[in-house]
Amino acid sequence: MEKSQIVIEQQQIESLDLLDFFKVLGRGLWLILLCTALFGGIAFGATYLIKQEWKAEAYIDQPTTVEIGNYYALFSTYKLVSGNAIDTSVQDKKALLDNDAQIIEGAYQEMKRQLTSYDTRRQFWLNTDYYKQQLTDDSKKDTDLLEKLIANTRFAEGNQAKKLPARITLQLDNPKQATELLTAFMEVANVAAREALYRDLVVKWQTLFNQTNS
């Protein structure tokens, strides 16, 4: 009898211990599920808190003589009148190519100057509806936004060794607007480069006329 009682008591104790274990496990399981749901909710909510941004990119390459058209003709005429023209009768193709390359490189460098110019980028963003529509009564916030837009408009030099072209990128929170505004900025930079090149050419012509008349 004593042995059977001991066995029964041990079984009861083991049953109680096992039952208590499942109760504890059950309480722990709810805690685990609660924590999982909580962290899952935080992660899900974070996707809405983190602002997505998109990058538009355009490659920049040297223009051709056709693309700079009128400027090329005027600059070549200036070199002819100033006595720096190439004698085409000699048929020195290398010299002709060097002359073309000099004019094209000058135009390309001016375009890059405008794309990287802080003033050009700042003036562009000040005139955009994108910036104007986000203005507040807080001058600091408005200035911070403007500086961010300027910083997000980046020019990167190319690498001939790696066959990587130069490029201009714009990072915004809307892919469509990023593409449209990058295109608009390139047009503004192109106009600014053209105006700068013509101003420089006008100065060259004026200097030449003054030298001729003196």
Image (spheres, grey):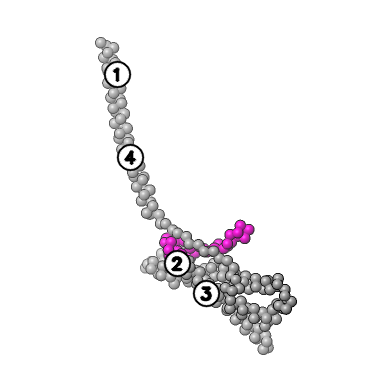
Q: Residue 123's mark?
A: none
Q: Secondary structure at mark 1?
A: helix
Identify the magenta region.
Answer: 150-179
Q: Which residue is mark 2?
A: 180
Residue 94: x %, y % from top left:
70, 71
Quadrant of the rendered image containing residue 34: top left
Q: Which residue is mark 1?
A: 10
Report the side of 188 relative to 135 (left or right): right
What amino acid does circle 2 point to? Glu
Dot 3 or dot 2: first in sequence order is: 2
- Name the one closer to the observer, 202 or 2: 202
What amino acid does circle 3 point to? Val
Q: Which residue is mark 3?
A: 191
Q: Secondary structure at mark 2?
A: helix
Q: Secondary structure at mark 4?
A: helix
Is residue 10 in view from this perspective? yes
Dot 1 or dot 4: first in sequence order is: 1
Dot 3 or dot 1: first in sequence order is: 1
Which callout, 2 or 1, points to the residue nearer the camera? 2
Dot 2 or dot 1: first in sequence order is: 1
Q: Which residue is mark 4?
A: 33
Query: Please, is residue 186 above or below residue 38 in the view?
Result: below
What amino acid does circle 4 point to? Leu
Does the residue at mark 3 contact the one at mark 1 (Cβ under 8 Å)? no
State the residue at coordinates (39%, 66%).
134
Which callout, 3 or 1, points to the residue nearer the camera? 3
Is residue 144 in view from this perspective? no
Dot 3 or dot 4: first in sequence order is: 4
Does the residue at mark 4 contact the one at mark 2 (Cβ under 8 Å)? no
What amino acid does circle 1 point to? Gln
Report the side of 170 relative to 90 (left or right): left
Distance CA(mark 3)–CA(mark 2): 17 Å
